[in-house]
Image (cartoon, rainbow, N blue to C red):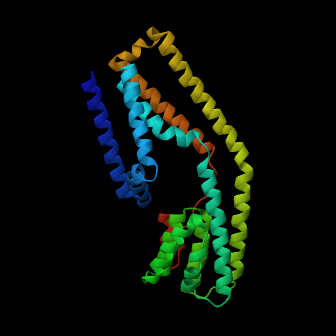
Amino acid sequence: MIETIAVIAAGAVIGAGVWLVLAALADPEAGRRLRRLRSAPFEQGRPLKLTVAIVGAVAVWTVTGWPVAGLLAGVGCWWLPAMLGPDRYHQQQVERIEAVAAWTEMLRDLMAGASGLHQAITATLPIAPAPIQADVARLSEQLRLGRPPHEALAEFADDVDNPTADLVAAALSTAASKHAADLGTLLGTLAESAREQSAMLVRAAANRARVRTSTRIIIAVTLGMAVLLMLFSPDYLEPFDGFLGQLVLGGIGVLWAAALTWLVRLSRPKLGPRVLAPGKRREEVPA
């Protein structure tokens, strides 16, 4: 039985890998997500997280005797802390939007003093806000190496990954390729808009926090019920011992994963569409 389940799991992993490769070949954005997924286990703090996931999977498999339960436990140990813990995604979005606003104001002031685009960007390196300092440094290096400004700015917007950065990059790209009247006024307006957006996200955080709290309660009650049944009424769970039971348990796990993903998306801020998304760069960024 275990060998059969292992073959099925291996087939599923191979199928997922083929799908990811095809998606990467068909969609540049999917390729970027694939590269992030491949490097994710080795980022800061991830080795410990991966170890906990493996230990949790082995422990649950050993206690229950269900390979699928072990797999689900490992996935849960990897994803649930990020999904149900502090809303770091929201905080990062607010910090990056405010950083873009502050950096835009720096560029506006420097370019008003007759500095060129490259000189202004280089001058902001020591004082660029921390959330985007590495992205600004990469942009400055690309310009120093002679890369066309519209390409370097499009890559910068892709690294920062929010609509406000796209608008700033588009404005700077226009200024670099042709005369842009009132660029300082435009940059100031974009910075003001970014600050208003970050304030709106902070105000909306309370509503999203209620969704996350509801998600935590649902998961705690469900897992608590499963543990109680396993301890005090193991006969009730006997149907899951067989091969068909494991398939059913896997289906339940997939449904739970889909539901949790949907709930987490409900709790995340909506920043609006990006105007310099990879599929739109050619049309939106002047050459």
Against 267, is 117 above or below?
below
Residue drawn at x 59%, y 68% is 165
Could you say which quadrant of the image residue 15 lies in?
A: top left
> Which residue is located at x 64 percent, y 63 percent?
97
In the foreground, 224 or 176: 224
**Residue 263 visible to an observer of this rendering:** yes
Is residue 116 shown above or below 281? below
Give the residue at x 57% y 29%: 219
Residue 46 placement (x, y as % from top left): 44, 48
Q: Whole-percent x and y of residue 30? A: 42, 55
Q: Is residue 170 visible?
A: no
Q: Quadrant of residue 271?
A: bottom right
Could you tell me residue 115's position as x and y percent?
61, 89
Quarter of the figure that contains the N terminus: top left
Q: Is residue 255 left or right of residue 209?
A: left
Q: Please report the residue visible at 61 percent of the width from the left and 34 percent of the height from the top.
A: 215
In the rendering, at what x and y percent does residue 238 appear? 41, 12
**Numbered disc total:** 0
Image vertical order of residue 233 relative to residue 30, above or below:
above
In the displayed orientation, state which residue is furthest to the bottom: 114
Rendered position, 282 above or below 69: below
Left or right: 14, with 130 as reference point: left
